[in-house]
Image (spheres, rainbow, N blue to C red):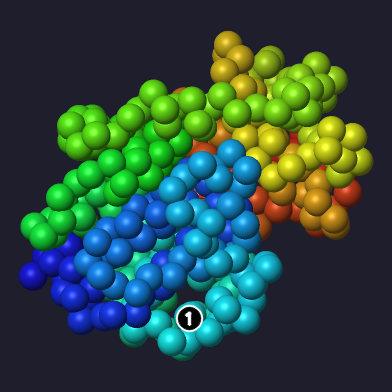
Amino acid sequence: MNILSAIIERIDRSKNIVLTAHKSPDGDSIGSSMAMYQYLKTLDKKVLVCHPDPCPNYLTWVENVDEILNYEEQAEQVAKALSEAELIFALDYNHPSRIGDMTPLLADSKEKLVMIDHHLNPADFVSLAYSKPETCSTAELVYELIHADSRVEMNERIGTPIYLGLLTDSGSFRFNSVVARTHEIVADLLNSGVNHTRIHESVFDQNSINQIRLKSYALNQKLELLHDNQVALISLTEEELNNFNYQKGDTEGLVNTGLSIKGIRMSILLQQKGDAIKMSMRSKKEVYVNQLAADHFDGGGHAYASGGISHDTMENTLNKLRSVVANYL
Ligand code: 5GP
Ligand code: MN
């Protein structure tokens, strides 16, 4: 039996299903979760979506995201949902640590866990894995699953969050991981009533004034170029973020602006939160930021889009970056 039939069979055998996705939700984790939610609702399942933290403001327009339980604010309900679930999906993450404080809740759930994901090197914590690292988004894999289920017709309600995941994880359909199949899927979604213009506007045209001012400040005052303008660093301290009344998601896309500078091969955004500095890394042309993240910043991810963390001061972290990035060019 192929993997999709096996997953569909597991769904058939379960009434109570919980959907989990990684912390700091993005378009793909929210999109995959909500597409699965709509699909499973169509099959008349009891479905709960349990995420580690709240949905960012720029994605609150997605249908039914207000149904998501988040562990940060609803720990008890999330713990109860996971303990009662017959089947748990791990969407858009490859390692239990990616769900943050929720990680211990999955400790004894391997038999119940099914992974749908596109990150490299999936860890062995599930009983069934639909893992395709060459795919640009988890939403694309969710599409393939639903497409393989002959009982369910694609429609706008299921298709909109799928399109969201495809759009955001593919850099608006420009990354190398986009293939002809991606566009075939998009064609099917549009034929099924998905309104792509509305989704693009909902994702990209929702900047607040503070957000525009914060991004402008970051680019104007905090952008540092290294190694003949091949590396762009942007650092934002907690104080600077607070000056612009920072809300989660406000710096979305900023690291990609760094990467859009002519000749740039690596772009890194550092943001301080409490005693940690969260780093977002992007690269191109044979520069692999997942190696830099894994070697020095307790992180990882995709070759061209990774992340990591530092518990040092901003100045020390920047100095460390300045001394090691050349090794990855
Ligand atoms: P972003 O910069 O959008 O937060 O993250 C880009 C990608 O890097 C994510 O899709 C994820 O694969 C990876 N990533 C981000 N933060 C971490 C981290 O702390 N650890 C690991 N292993 N991967 C991360
Ligand atoms: Mn993803």
Q: Is residue 189 left or right of residue 125?
A: left
Q: Position of residue 245 (x, y in %)?
A: 83, 38
Q: Secondary structure at mark 1?
A: helix
Q: Nearer the viewer, residue 156 or 264?
A: 156
Q: Nearer the viewer, residue 234 or 121?
A: 234
Residue at image point 68% right, 15% down: 228
Residue 59 in sight: yes
**Measured along the vertical axis of the image, is residue 16 above or below residue 115?**
below
Residue at image point 62% right, 61% down: 53
Q: Nearer the viewer, residue 153 or 147?
A: 153
Q: Is residue 171 left or right of residue 280?
A: left
Q: Residue furthest top?
A: 262
Residue at image point 81% right, 46% down: 272
Q: Quadrant of the C terminus?
A: top right
Residue 204 falls in which quadrant of the image? Answer: top right
CB at disc 1 and ligand 2 closer than 8 Å: no
Count of numbered badges drawn on the protein: 1
Q: Position of residue 200 (x, y in %)?
A: 44, 27
- Mark 1 Cα within 10 Å, few/some/many (few <14, many 20+)? many
Q: Position of residue 229 (x, y in %)?
A: 68, 16
Q: Is residue 193 left or right of residue 231?
A: left
**Measured along the vertical axis of the image, is residue 281 above or below residue 278?**
above
- At label 1, the amino acid type is Leu
Residue 280 in sight: no
**Measured along the vertical axis of the image, is residue 147 above or below residue 328?**
below
Q: Nearer the viewer, residue 237 or 75?
A: 75
Q: Quadrant of the N terminus?
A: bottom left
Q: Which residue is mark 1?
A: 82
Q: Position of residue 19 (x, y in %)?
A: 42, 67
Residue at image point 60% right, 28% down: 206
